[in-house]
Image (cartoon, rainbow, N blue to C red):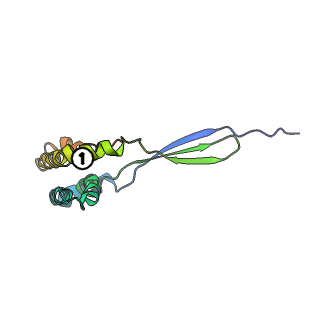
Amino acid sequence: MTEATAATPTTTVVDSRQGPHILLRILWFLLVGWWLSFFWITLTAAVNLTIIGIPLGLWMANRIPQVVTLKFDRTRYTTERDGDGNVTLTISNTVQRPFWQRAIWYLLVGWWLTTLWLYLAWLCCVTLILIPVAFPMFSTTGKLLTLKRG
């Protein structure tokens, strides 16, 4: 007689890296990203000045790293298998500050500070020497604009 063995619980965490290969991203930046990002930033700032355009402006601001270098956000997936073999898939989301705090920040500080920050990042970008400074600046757009976490 054989004993039935219970499955042991397991947890797997996967960081999904979406987007093109680094060589394509470099080529994109050199041929398109550096000049397209200037127009994208300018259009984003203009759209954010209108009340009706704020949702589009926020969406555009969060896409600036994609416009510059085709960088996509990472998604963290966690799968858990319990002792009975049931699998649970969880997509991690960072808990955000309350909406009212983020809205007040955006209206009083976020929109103009982010615009200045992005133009400074763009200037760093086109100097070529300061590219290592510029890319992290572009990546902080959501945090600066709306206090977005994660």
Residue at the outermost right position: 1
Q: Which residue shows up at 57% across the image and 40% down it?
A: 11
Left or right: residue 141 versus residue 85 is: left
Residue 147, picture quadrant: top left
Q: Position of residue 122 (x, y in %)?
A: 15, 50
Q: Position of residue 104 (x, y in %)?
A: 26, 44
Label count reads 1
- The residue beneath circle 1 is 106
Q: Position of residue 48 (x, y in %)?
A: 20, 56
Please say if 85 is above or below 66: above
Q: Amino acid at mark 1?
A: Tyr
Q: Position of residue 77 (x, y in %)?
A: 49, 47
The front one of 10 and 112 is 112
Residue 52, picture quadrant: bottom left
Image quadrant in which the N terminus is located = top right
The front one of 71 and 147 is 147
Q: Which residue shows up at 25% across the image and 53% down it?
A: 61
Left or right: residue 81 versus residue 67 is: right
